[in-house]
Amino acid sequence: MTINEYQKLAMVTLNPELDKKDVLINGVMGLCGESGEAIDIVKKHLAQGHELDKEKLAKELGDVAWYLAETATAIGYDLDDIFQMNIDKLKKRYPEGFSVEKSVNRNE
Ligand SMILES: [Mg+2]
């Protein structure tokens, strides 16, 4: 499955009653909410003695992906374009791969 195929399949489950503005708001709120669920799993592992539940964490990452797809859809972007834009930015920032020096002296 390509990332654009994922976006299309995921958006089949988008509430069709939401207007464009609500899709955007739901998308960014969902990104925060699902990221928080992922953080909570790691917090329980690091601070409360729980085993790291990798399967549960992976499922939360999937939920993050869903809301990423929704937010991208709300602004008229394909996920493939967003991923490519990010890789282009990273290649420009770290042409030889990550370095502390390039990170500290970054020109944005
Ligand atoms: Mg979740």
Image: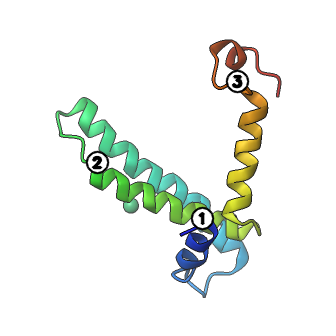
| Label 2 or label 1, whichever comes before in sequence order | 1
Give, as a three-letter code, the residue at label 2: Lys
- Label pair 2/1, CB-CB below 8 angstroms: no
> Mark 2 to mark 1: distance in Å?
22 Å
Q: Residue at x 76, y 42 (%)?
A: 88
> Mark 1 to mark 3: distance in Å?
26 Å
Q: Residue at x 36, y 54 (%)?
A: 58
| Label 1 or label 3, whichever comes before in sequence order | 1
Residue on which the image places disc 1: 3
Whether ligand 1 has any atom under 8 Å from the Cβ at mark 2 is answered as: no
Q: Residues within 10 Å of mark 1 (few under 14, many from 20)?
A: some
Q: Residue at x 70, y 24 (%)?
A: 96
Residue on which the image places disc 2: 54
Position in image of residue 55 (x %, y %): 28, 54
Residue on which the image places disc 3: 96
Provide the secondary structure element on which disc 3 rests.
Answer: loop
19 left or right, relative to 47: right
Give, as a three-letter code, the residue at label 3: Glu
Quadrant for ligand 1?
bottom left
Residue 76, numbered circle: none
Q: Residues within 10 Å of mark 2 (few under 14, many from 20)?
A: few
Colour mode?
A: rainbow
Q: Residue at x 28, y 48 (%)?
A: 54
